[in-house]
Image (cartoon, helix red, strand yellow):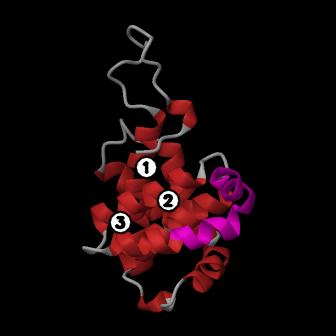
Amino acid sequence: MISDESDRFNPRDPKPADAGKPSKSMKRREARKLATQALYQWHMASHSLNEIEAQFRVDNDFTDVDGAYFREILHGVPASKTEIDAVLKPCMDLALEELDPVELAVLRLSTWELLKRVDVPYRVVINEGIELAKVFGSTDGHKFVNGVLDKVAPNVRAAEVKAFKR
C-alpha cells in the first residue's frame, strides 16, 4: 500500500509521540471514503453540498477523519465537474451517463485529486481510487477504475509519471 511521504513511520523511533493515533494518510483515506458516499448522494439526489456536508458531519464520527480534506473534496469535485468530465471522457469507452454512479463518484474524486492536489503522488491517488472502488463499487469495478486512472494520470501529470517510470 502506498502512503503519502509525509506519513512515513521511522522504525528506529522507540515510540512516536502520536502512537495509537491515526496517521495523516489514514485520516485522508477516511475522508475519501465519506466523500465518495457524499458525492454519490450529490449525484443521485441533487441535494445541496452544504446540506450533504451537514448531514455527513452529524451522522458520522469525524474523530479519525481529515474533515478539512473531506470538505475540500466534497466542494471541489462539483466545482470542477466540467473540467473533470472533460479529462475522463477520452480515457473511457463508455459515456459518463453509462457508468455505475459509485464508480463515477470514485473516478471524479480521483481525477480531481490528480488535477488539483499535486501534493498527493499520482500513484497514491490511483491506489486510493482502486481501494474506494473495492469497498463501494461492483465486483470488478476496481479494475475499470484502475484502467481509467492509468490513462488519466499521464495526461494530467505527465512529468511526474515520466519521472517515476525512468
**Residue 60 screen position, x and y as percent:** 30, 49
Helix, strand or loop: magenta stretch? helix
Q: Relative to residue 23, is residue 27 depicted above or below? A: below
Which residue occupies 28% across, 61% down? 135
The amino acid type found where label 2 is placed reads Ile
Question: Mark 1 against mark 2, which lies toward the viewer?
Answer: 2
**Residue 67 screen position, x and y as percent:** 47, 44
Whether tag 1 and tag 2 are in contact, CB under 8 A, the answer is: no
Q: Which residues are magenta?
A: 149-166
How busy is the neighbourhood of tag 3: few (under 14 within 10 Å), some, or many (20 plus)? many
Number of labels in the image equals: 3
Displayed quadrant of residue 114 = bottom right
Q: Is residue 98 magenta?
A: no
- Residue 126 disc label: 2
Which residue occupies 38% across, 55% down? 34
Q: CA distance from mark 3 to mark 1?
A: 15 Å
- Secondary structure beneath label 3: helix
Tag 3 residue: 133
The amino acid type found where label 1 is placed reads Ala
Which residue occupies 64% across, 51% down? 164
**Residue 35 screen position, x and y as percent:** 43, 58
Question: Mark 3 against mark 2, which lies toward the viewer?
Answer: 2
Question: Mark 3 against mark 1, which lies toward the viewer?
Answer: 3
Tag 1 residue: 31
Displayed quadrant of residue 160 = bottom right
